[in-house]
Amino acid sequence: APAGACSAIGRPACVRRAARWESPGAAIMSTAMNFGSKSFQPRPPDKGSFPLDHFGECKSFKEKFMKCLRDNNFENALCRNESKEYLECRMERQLMAQEPLEKLGFGDLIGGKSDKN
């Protein structure tokens, strides 16, 4: 509607438009979206999420592990040593939490031992 067209009182289109912008419920709706005064504090999962290797500090270990997977038809059991080395690199550079290798399932590989023959 042109400027000033809603100045006549009682025009239904003007009343609906004004109600949309000036209704007392609009203020209630905007505060209701805050879900009260509680603030949401995101928390990362305990396992399975860690910082990306933005600087490629462990890239060579990752590439060696991925090559092993490709060469072995993605049988990860055949690439456990490469996986262990990659995770050790990440832990040494604080790209993941320090965990004992036994807890990560590599207890049998500690000290250079391996299931591979």
Image: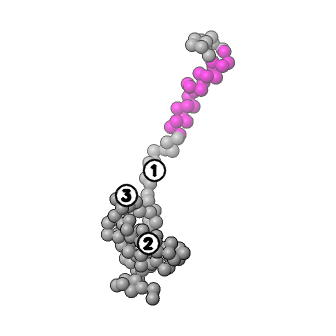
Quick one: 112 or 117, which is closer to the camera? Answer: 117
Distance, label 3 to label 1, CA atoms, is 28 Å
Res 42 seen here: yes
Magenta residues (range):
11-32
- Residue at the (48%, 80%) spot, across then down: 78
Quick one: 42 or 22, which is closer to the camera? Answer: 42
Q: Nearer the viewer, mark 3 or mark 1?
A: 3
Residue type pointed to by label 2:
Phe
- Residue at the (60%, 13%) spot, across then down: 2
Q: Nearer the viewer, mark 3 or mark 2?
A: 2
Kindly state the secondary structure of the residue where label 3 is placed.
loop
Distance, label 2 to label 1, CA atoms, is 38 Å
Res 97 seen here: no
Residue type pointed to by label 1:
Phe
Tell me if residue 112 is in the magenta stretch. no
Between discs 3 and 1, the one toward the N terminus: 1
Tell me if residue 13 is in the magenta stretch. yes
Q: Nearer the viewer, mark 2 or mark 1?
A: 2
Q: On the image, numbered disc 2 is attached to which residue?
A: 65
Mark 1: few, some, or many residues within 10 Å (few <14, many ≥20)? few
Pinpoint residue 79: horizontal percent, then vertical percent.
46, 77
Quick one: 43 or 57, which is closer to the camera? Answer: 57
- Checking the image for residue 54, the label placed there is 3
